[in-house]
Image (cartoon, rainbow, N blue to C red):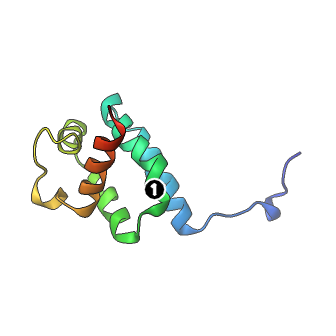
Amino acid sequence: MTVPPDQTPSLSADETRRKRLRFRCWHRGIKETDLLLGRFADARIFELDPKRLDELEALMEAQDWDIYAWVSRGTPPPPEFDTKLMQMLQDFTRDTVA
């Protein structure tokens, strides 16, 4: 059974933004970064406030291997990515990756 177009539930702009970001986190280009960001997004995307969402969107513009190195604490992030979100990502990764 299909839902008529006029009865299709619509997503709010906030829900759409979060779902797009979650998709982008899982489809970065290299599997290592997909796993770090995708797992974080699955667990926390709906807890992030607008400022953290802005930080995540900015992070999506960085190179995959750079993100991986920063989140896994291989190298320190540059000042523009040394944010509350980066700390959340690093803590999440430390707590979930054995």
- Residue at point 34% right, 33% down? 29
Amino acid residing under circle 1: Ile
Q: How many marks?
A: 1
Q: Quadrant location of residue 33?
A: top left
Image-based side of 71 in relation to 15, left or right = left
Image-based side of 20 in relation to 12, left or right = left
Q: Quadrant of the N terminus?
A: top right
Q: Quadrant of the C terminus?
A: top left
Reading the image, the residue beneath label 1 is 45
Question: Viewer-proximal residue, 65 or 42?
Answer: 42
Residue 2 placement (x, y as % from top left): 85, 48
Question: Viewer-proximal residue, 57 or 71?
Answer: 71
- Residue at point 21% right, 62% down? 83
90, above or below 30, in the image? below
Image-based side of 25 in relation to 80, left or right = right
Local packing at callout 1 (Cα closer than 10 Å; few below 14, some 14-19, many 20+) is: many
Question: Viewer-proximal residue, 94 or 32?
Answer: 94
- Residue at point 18% right, 57% down? 81
Q: Quadrant location of residue 94?
A: top left
- Residue at point 54% right, 60% down? 16
Residue 11 placement (x, y as % from top left): 63, 63
49, above or below 42, in the image? below
Residue 58 placement (x, y as % from top left): 28, 58
Residue 34 placement (x, y as % from top left): 37, 36
Residue 19 shows in the view: yes
Secondary structure beneath label 1: helix
Residue 30 shows in the view: no
